[in-house]
Image (cartoon, rainbow, N blue to C red):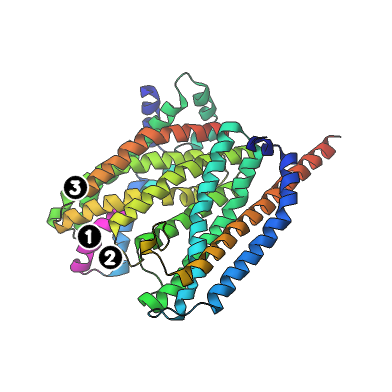
């Protein structure tokens, strides 16, 4: 499983893997928003944490179809399905790899973009914390969506339609943690719920993903 | 004699064919009776005026929107566990009806909200949860359409339905946490203290019964259509082979 994780990481970092595209997209979203809503610092600082959450979510979404599509094309997914490690483990590893190349860099770059969007000083720690807690859930849910559409040609748009409603609870709690933190309110309830969602999706969704891959490959 | 006998498509076709006209007629009678009774023979509410009559469309469709998803959940689990094709096809047949019910609930709600709350839409927990349910129906139907192999499509949509149910519930509570709203609580409940007055309640019950039977009739009809198109495809395949 560690070998598979390393392989996935290497594939996505090397040329053609699309590493960094998500980050560039995230940067673009943060740049475009002030053009759309106006550059007053008061408005921006109020919506900054929400914008960053939505941007991170969309950046995650963009990179999802790479999780299984390339493996499906060159046949290595069939090999993985017949490999001695369980398919549930493969799904979990794929989600972990996706998080390391997408979720983790997004979390690290978010404070920098927070400066661009004039996020209030108290908001940085909750923003990073909420993204750190929430992005694994985004990767786990996204892996499930990618697994559902693995056999579908041009499934990108369909996958977005399937995955976005599933992202709603994570987004609500994640953005709530960041927003309340920035406003100096108590955010422990939302934080606990976010942690619960992440733990639950990471534990359960690999099984659903594996079932979907099996159905897709049959 | 058990319910599993209807997993046999032939048996299902026989019984549903015999049942369908009666259920359809009863559905039409009850729906028309409930709506006419509600629209023309109930008094106006003393605060809401005649807009209260939207309730006869709004409440039944909203109830059905949720119940149809639950029914799809049950049939999906049956498909995954026992591999009965009729079950998967019933879920497929029910989804567009559920989508329509959700749409009716949303639209009538908007028409009701405009004069009462002064707004067509508010980011209220119930409203938002229904919008998300609408998106779930859309995704479910799109997934059915996208996959060619019928068994594969049934498998994947069943998995989506199960996972989607969990997330729909989760969204409901998340949205409740996110925003407190305008929408009132339950209007119908078993204990008598907190529901609408009898004059409005009886026609409402009739029209709910009409909507339920209407759903059953449409669902049977659509399932029969699906079974027939399956048979047609099988016949075509056999033709090509020979």
Q: Who comes first in sequence, dot 2 or dot 1?
A: 2
Q: Report crowding for label 1: few under 14, some 14 to 19, many 20 or more residues within 10 A (C-alpha).
A: many
Q: Where is residue B227 in the image (x, y as percent from the top left)?
A: 71, 45
Element on which disc 1 rests:
loop
Quadrant for the C terminus of chain B in the image: top right
Q: Where is residue B209 in the image (x, y as percent from the top left)?
A: 57, 60
Whole-Å distance between the Cαs marked 3 and 2?
A: 30 Å
Relative to A110, does residue B155 appear above or below in the rendering?
above
- Residue on which disc 2 sits: A34
Whole-Å distance between the Cαs marked 2 and 1?
A: 8 Å
Q: Position of residue B90 (x, y in %)?
A: 62, 46
Quadrant for the N terminus of chain B in the image: top right
Element on which disc 3 rests:
helix
Q: What stretch is highlighted in magenta?
A: A39-54
Relative to B193, does residue A67 appear above or below in the rendering?
above
Q: Who comes first in sequence, dot 3 or dot 2?
A: 2
- Point out the frontmost of discs 1 and 3: 3
The dominant secondary structure in magenta is helix
Task: State the residue in front, B19 or B125.
Answer: B19
Q: Report crowding for label 3: few under 14, some 14 to 19, many 20 or more residues within 10 A (C-alpha).
A: few
Q: In which quarter of the image is residue A102?
A: top left
- Residue on which disc 3 sits: A188
Q: Quadrant of residue B231?
A: top right
Relative to B140, does residue A8 appear above or below in the rendering?
above
């Amino acid at each position: 499983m560690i070998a598979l994780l390393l392989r996935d990481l290497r594939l996505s970092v090397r040329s053609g893997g699309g590493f960094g595209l998500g980050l560039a997209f995230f940067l673009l979203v943060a740049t475009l928003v002030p053009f759309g809503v106006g550059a007053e610092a008061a408005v921006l600082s109020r919506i900054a944490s929400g914008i960053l959450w939505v941007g991170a979510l969309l950046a995650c979404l963009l990179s999802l179809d790479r999780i299984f599509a390339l493996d499906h094309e060159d046949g290595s997914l069939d090999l993985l399905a017949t490999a001695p490690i369980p398919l549930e483990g493969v799904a979990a590893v794929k989600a972990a790899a996706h998080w390391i190349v997408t979720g983790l860099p997004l979390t690290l770059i978010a404070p920098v973009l927070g400066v661009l969007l004039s996020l209030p000083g108290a908001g940085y720690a909750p923003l990073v914390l909420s993204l750190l807690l929430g992005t694994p859930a985004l990767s786990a849910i996204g892996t499930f969506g990618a697994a559902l559409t693995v056999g579908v040609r041009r499934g990108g748009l369909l996958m977005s339609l399937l995955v976005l409603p599933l992202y709603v609870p994570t987004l609500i709690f994640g953005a709530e943690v960041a927003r309340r933190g920035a406003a100096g309110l108590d955010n422990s309830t939302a934080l606990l719920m976010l942690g619960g969602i992440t733990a639950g999706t990471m534990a359960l969704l690999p099984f659903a993903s594996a079932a979907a891959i099996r159905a897709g490959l049959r | 004699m058990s319910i599993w006998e209807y997993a046999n498509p032939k048996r299902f076709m026989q019984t549903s064919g015999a049942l369908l006209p009666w259920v359809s007629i009863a559905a039409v009678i009850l729906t028309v009776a409930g709506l006419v009774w509600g629209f023309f023979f109930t008094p106006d509410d003393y605060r809401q005026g005649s807009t209260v009559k939207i309730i006869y469309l709004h409440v039944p469709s909203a109830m059905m929107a949720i119940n149809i998803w639950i029914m799809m959940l049950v049939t999906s689990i049956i498909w995954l566990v026992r591999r009965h094709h009729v079950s998967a096809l019933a879920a497929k047949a029910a989804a567009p009806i559920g989508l329509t019910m959700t749409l009716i609930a949303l639209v009538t709600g908007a028409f009701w909200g405009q004069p009462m709350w002064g707004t067509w839409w508010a980011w209220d927990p119930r409203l938002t949860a229904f919008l998300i349910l609408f998106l779930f129906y859309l995704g479910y139907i799109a997934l059915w359409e996208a996959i060619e192999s019928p068994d594969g499509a049934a498998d994947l949509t069943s998995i989506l339905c199960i996972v989607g149910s969990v997330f729909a519930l989760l969204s409901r509570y998340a949205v409740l946490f996110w925003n407190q709203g305008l929408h009132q609580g339950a209007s119908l409940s078993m204990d008598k203290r907190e529901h609408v007055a009898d004059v409005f309640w009886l026609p409402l019950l009739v029209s709910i019964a009409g909507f339920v039977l209407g759903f059953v009739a449409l669902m049977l009809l659509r399932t029969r259509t699906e079974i027939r198109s399956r048979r047609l495809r099988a016949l075509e395949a056999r033709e090509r082979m020979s």
